[in-house]
């Protein structure tokens, strides 16, 4: 069986690291195409160095373009590679332009498509990611859903065939790398951080970064908190802060502004902080898995179960301080996102599908 995996963005490298490992252990031939959507060393190379992820076989170097141009150019290059190198399956992750480009090419070439992290919905079509998810799910033959809610969302859109509830590969990644993070990460010492004595914040969604009033309100809210905020800054957020002349916030004592960190450093920060403040999808879920309260600077979330169980609050920046002050830890913390064996489940189902004749050119 031959699989071509299409990756392009930070969370996809993390998700793929556990699945690639499971594929390789099962003797399945995987070729990786890196679209280049995330390209600088702290957003890309560092994950290939630290995690069990093979170097990409193809690097398309496509980035820093508007959505249409980026997706179109990726499609053109991906199509060229696939025509020379027809696989049994194409595999895509999550909801980026790289996901969408891979899904559209697979559909046009009639190559069966695997979507890992299928069925997520924010029900906000202003988010570019929402469009990417919906289209990709509708084009996929094998859909690996992380939660029962994701399965339900797919069912409501008429997608039942090929859907498998396997848990979340990001939970697998946490369980796989937590010990290595504890052994090797020096991030707490480097910034003189004591456990439970700081908040961890990440911001990168266009809804938070592209409007200067909103972005300054977020930065201002960080300065109002009772503990310093460690803030690994995403490159596009950094560019916006600079462009909007908001750099002064980053020099206050309340904000420890640092470049994006490695996944191992991130796991240390997430498990040691007092609480997480974010607009990231993956980080809301990681906060839950690591038992940390999360304050999400958005109006809706795809990871609704974290809100339902009381561990995640959707907040407006102006209410952040109040929300943190009045937070009480829920008494229940049910196991969500599976047992940490989603990648193995995915590989087992793939092997089963070969026996049934789907996705096989052999
Ligand atoms: N992450 C990281 N370093 C950082 C920020 C995030 O390793 O400086 C990891 C984080 O732990 C999670 C993933 O990147 O696994 C989330 O990516 P991001 O927030 O960029 O994307 P989203 O999940 O919102 O799509």
Image (cartoon, rainbow, N blue to C red):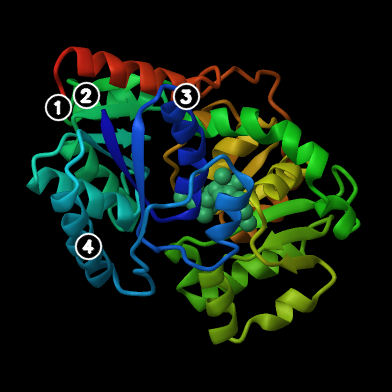
Residue receiving disc 1: 158
Relative to 112, residue 97 above or below: below
Label 4 crowd (10 A; few <14 / some 14-19 / many >=20): some
Label 3 crowd (10 A; few <14 / some 14-19 / many >=20): few
Q: Do the residues under discs 1 and 4 have CB atoms within 8 angstroms?
A: no
Where residue 136 sits in the image (x, y, percent)? 23, 43
Residue drawn 22% across the image and 24% down it: 155
Relative to 248, residue 196 above or below: above
Where residue 1 sits in the image (x, y, percent)? 26, 28
Q: Which mark is residue 155?
A: 2
C-alpha separation, residue under disc 2 versus residue under disc 3? 32 Å
Where residue 163 sits in the image (x, y, percent)? 26, 22
Residue drawn 43% across the image and 46% down it: 300
* In front of the other: 297 or 104: 104
Question: Which of label 3 and label 4 is nearer to you?
Answer: 3
Of labels 3 and 4, earlier in sequence is 3
Residue drawn 85% across the image and 43% down it: 196
Q: Do the residues under discs 2 and 1 have CB atoms within 8 angstroms?
A: yes
């Amino acid at each position: 069986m031959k699989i071509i995996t299409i990756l392009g963005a930070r969370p996809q490298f993390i998700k793929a690291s556990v699945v690639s490992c499971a594929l390789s252990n099962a003797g399945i031939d995987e070729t990786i195409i890196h679209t280049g959507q995330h390209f600088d060393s702290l957003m890309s190379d560092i994950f290939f160095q630290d995690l069990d992820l093979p170097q990409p076989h193809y690097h398309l170097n496509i980035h820093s373009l508007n959505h249409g141009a980026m997706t179109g150019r990726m499609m053109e290059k991906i199509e060229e590679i696939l025509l020379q190198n027809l696989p049994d399956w194409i595999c895509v992750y999550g909801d980026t332009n790289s996901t969408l480009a891979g899904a559209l090419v697979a559909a046009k070439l009639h190559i069966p498509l695997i979507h890992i992290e299928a069925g997520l919905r924010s029900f906000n079509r202003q988010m570019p990611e929402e469009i990417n998810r919906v289209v990709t799910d509708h084009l996929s033959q094998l859909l690996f859903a992380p939660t029962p809610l994701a399965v339900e969302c797919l069912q409501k859109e008429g997608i039942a065939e090929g859907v498998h509830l396997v848990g979340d590969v990001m939970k697998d990644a946490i369980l796989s790398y937590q010990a290595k993070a504890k052994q090797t990460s020096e991030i707490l010492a480097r910034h003189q951080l004591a456990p439970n004595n700081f908040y961890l914040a990440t911001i990168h969604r266009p809804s938070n970064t592209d409007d200067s009033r909103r972005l300054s309100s977020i930065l201002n809210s960080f300065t109002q908190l009772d503990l310093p905020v460690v803030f690994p800054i995403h490159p596009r957020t950094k560019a916006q802060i600079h462009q909007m002349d908001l750099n002064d916030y980053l020099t206050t004592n309340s904000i420890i502004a640092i470049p994006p960190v490695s996944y191992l450093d991130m796991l240390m920060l997430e498990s040691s902080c007092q609480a997480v403040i974010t607009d990231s999808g993956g980080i809301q879920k990681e906060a839950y898995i690591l038992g940390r309260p999360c304050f999400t600077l958005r109006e809706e979330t795809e990871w609704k179960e974290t809100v339902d169980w009381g561990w995640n609050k959707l907040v407006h920046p102006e209410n952040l301080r109040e929300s943190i002050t009045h937070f009480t830890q829920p008494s229940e913390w049910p196991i969500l996102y599976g047992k940490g064996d989603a990648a193995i489940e995915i590989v087992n189902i793939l092997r089963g599908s070969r026996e049934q004749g789907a996705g096989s050119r052999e």
